[in-house]
Image (cartoon, rainbow, N blue to C red):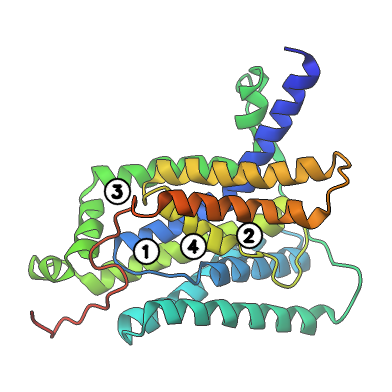
Amino acid sequence: MSVEIISAAESFLAAAIRMGTPLAIAGLGETYSERCGVLNIGLEGIMLSGAFFSFIAAFLTGSIALGLAAGILGGLLMSMIHAFLSIHLRADQTIAGLALNFLSMGLTSYLFLVVFGRSTQLPECPVVGRIAIPLLSDIPLIGPVLFNQDGFVYFLLFAVAASWFLFYRTDWGLQMHGVGEHPRAADSAGLSVYRTRYFSAAMNGIFGGIAGSYLTLGLLGFFMENLTSGKGYIALVVVILGRRNPMGILLASLLLGSAEALQFRVQTMGSTIPSQVFIMFPYLITVVVMLFSIGKSKDPAALGIPFIRTKRG
């Protein structure tokens, strides 16, 4: 295999991982929520909020750490708004999620306009650098792809392993499963359904905020209106395709990340095909994947159903 082919393969696979990372991180957060019975399609709004507040903090302070902290808080705030509406007020979870997306889109656009005004030049913020792991990064093909990435990618790999262990090897994972499948039985056994669901919503906000922060602090280095461009909805597809299993979510995100990486790769090759065709490519792949996954993912029995403790039967 020639050096040029190996180099091209390394570049493409590394890009696929970076493109899939925000989808996987956000998908993990949504998995926490859905396993407890809370459906939050406001993932787009959570990611957008995380992206905006991480950018603002990093731009004003020059600190990536403070930017990440602000992004997490932004995502957490949006998620807890949804949790309050759907868990405490027992609002329709789908409607609450859509409202969250519209709220985040309008709020971030307005605040961005207030801070920076109307300008043709986008302000920039610092971005994270790659961290090469000694020895491992020197392995041909695998090394540059897996062990010469930024901290967000390494966090994803750790989060996937930790979430898998939590879901399938701990009592807390069994409690989450019980609350998502039979909340009334879980309540009768002495578990707090409300506390468990609020915890899962908080995890969704934290992961979603990190995913949004990666867009500005890891991939782009700037913010603009509607920066996420549907990535929150694609992350929901990742959850379905991955069947709410951390390893499945990782593989599904890599598949869709590969489609996005291929889009940029083909565009840079100077093709005469209109660029709109390539922009559409990741979303087309998402639709095709959804068609093949229909009926193959079993939802938690109580997903999207409000829990009313005083109600019997």
Q: Percent position (x, y) of residue 151?
A: 61, 43
Regarding residue 244, the answer to whether it shows in the image is yes
Q: Locate residue 305: give its quadrant.
A: bottom left
Answer left or right for 278 relative to 298: right
Residue at 21 percent of width and 64 percent of height: 179
The vertical placement of 12 against 174, above or below, is: above
Residue denoted by label 2: 213
CA gap between label 3 and label 4 equals: 17 Å
* First in residue order: circle 3 vs circle 4: 3
Label 1 element class: helix
Say which amino acid is labelled 3. Phe
Label 2 element class: helix
Residue denoted by label 1: 33
> Cβ–Cβ below 8 Å for labels 1 and 3?
no
Residue at 67 percent of width and 19 percent of height: 138
CA gap between label 3 and label 2 equals: 25 Å
Residue at 49 percent of width and 44 percent of height: 252
CA gap between label 1 and label 2 equals: 20 Å
Q: Percent position (x, y) of residue 15?
A: 69, 39
CA gap between label 2 and label 4 equals: 10 Å
Q: Which mark is residue 206?
A: 4
* First in residue order: circle 1 vs circle 2: 1
Say which amino acid is labelled 4. Ile
* First in residue order: circle 3 vs circle 2: 3
Residue at 29 percent of width and 48 percent of height: 167
Residue denoted by label 3: 167
Name the mark nearer the viewer: 1 or 2: 1
Q: Quadrant of the C terminus?
A: bottom left
